[in-house]
Image (cartoon, rainbow, N blue to C red):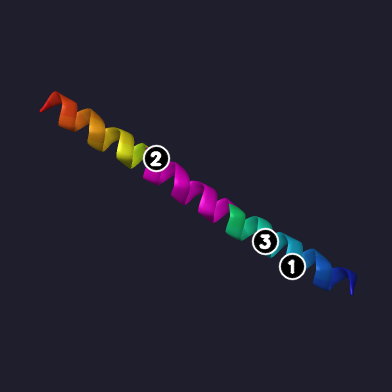
Amino acid sequence: MKTYIKSAVSEELYLYGIWRVLCVLCIFGALCFFYFNILV
């Protein structure tokens, strides 16, 4: 039972990390998009 809970928690943290990276990439991409639009 302990190992099952541990694996479930690690899987949640893993997914959370992926979503966090995706959010950062999306925000960075949006900032770059606006930046280049202002320049051009």
| Residue 12 badge | 3
**Which SS class for mark 3?**
helix
How packed mark 3 is, by other alpha carbons closer than 10 Å (few <14, some 14-19, many 20 or more), is: few
Looking at the rendering, in which quadrant would you find the N terminus? Answer: bottom right
Span shown in magenta? 17-27
**Which SS class for mark 2?**
helix
Identify the residue under disc 1: 8
Q: Nearer the viewer, residue 23 or 13?
A: 23
Q: Is residue 32 magenta?
A: no
Identify the residue under disc 2: 27
| Residue 39 badge | none
CB atoms of marks 2 and 3 within 8 Å: no
Callout in the foreground (1, 2): 2
- Image coordinates of residue 32 in percent, x first then y, are 27, 34
Q: Sequence order check: which comes first, mark 1 or mark 2? A: 1
Q: Amino acid at mark 3?
A: Glu
- Image coordinates of residue 34 in percent, x first then y, are 24, 33
Q: CA distance from mark 2 to mark 3?
A: 22 Å
CB atoms of marks 1 and 3 within 8 Å: yes
Q: Sequence order check: which comes first, mark 2 or mark 3? A: 3
Q: Amino acid at mark 1?
A: Ala
